[in-house]
Amino acid sequence: MSIDKQSEISANLQIGPTSLGMVRIYVEADGVELPLDFEPEEALEIAEELRAAAEAAQTVGTKK
């Protein structure tokens, strides 16, 4: 599956700090639980990428 392909999969997403000073992104879907831990610096990079993708998606949506 490519990143640009529509999906019918539904998932829950939780994000928060851990007791060890990491940032956890927790994904749960169809009986699968996926805890992903990141150093704070990595989490900030992910946040920047997420913001950039959201801004790019807004421009795609307004070109119709």
Image (tube, rainbow, N blue to C red):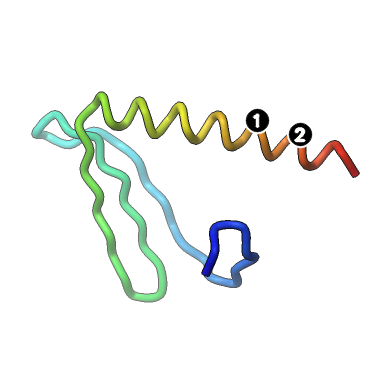
Q: Which mark is residue 55?
A: 1
| Residue 30 as seen in the image, left or right of residue 9 | left
Q: Quadrant of residue 38?
A: top left
Q: Which residue is painted at 26% across and 24% down in the image?
A: 41
- Mark 1–mark 2 Cα distance, whole angstroms, equals 7 Å
Question: Are discs 1 and 2 less than 8 Å apart at CB?
Answer: yes
**Pick the front one: 7 or 14:** 7
Q: Quadrant of residue 56?
A: top right
- Label 1 amino acid? Glu
How many marks the image carries: the answer is 2
- Label 2 amino acid? Thr
Could you say where residue 49 lies in the image, as x and y percent from the top left? 47, 33
Q: Quadrant of the C terminus?
A: top right
Q: Which residue is painted at 46% across and 62% down in the image?
A: 11
Q: Quadrant of residue 23?
A: top left
Q: Which mark is residue 59?
A: 2
Q: Which residue is painted at 73% across and 35% down in the image?
A: 58
| Residue 13 as seen in the image, left or right of residue 16 | right
Could you say where residue 28 lies in the image, as x and y percent from the top left? 36, 62
Could you say where residue 30 lies in the image, as x and y percent from the top left? 40, 75
| Residue 31 as seen in the image, left or right of residue 35 | right
35 to 21, vertically: above or below: below
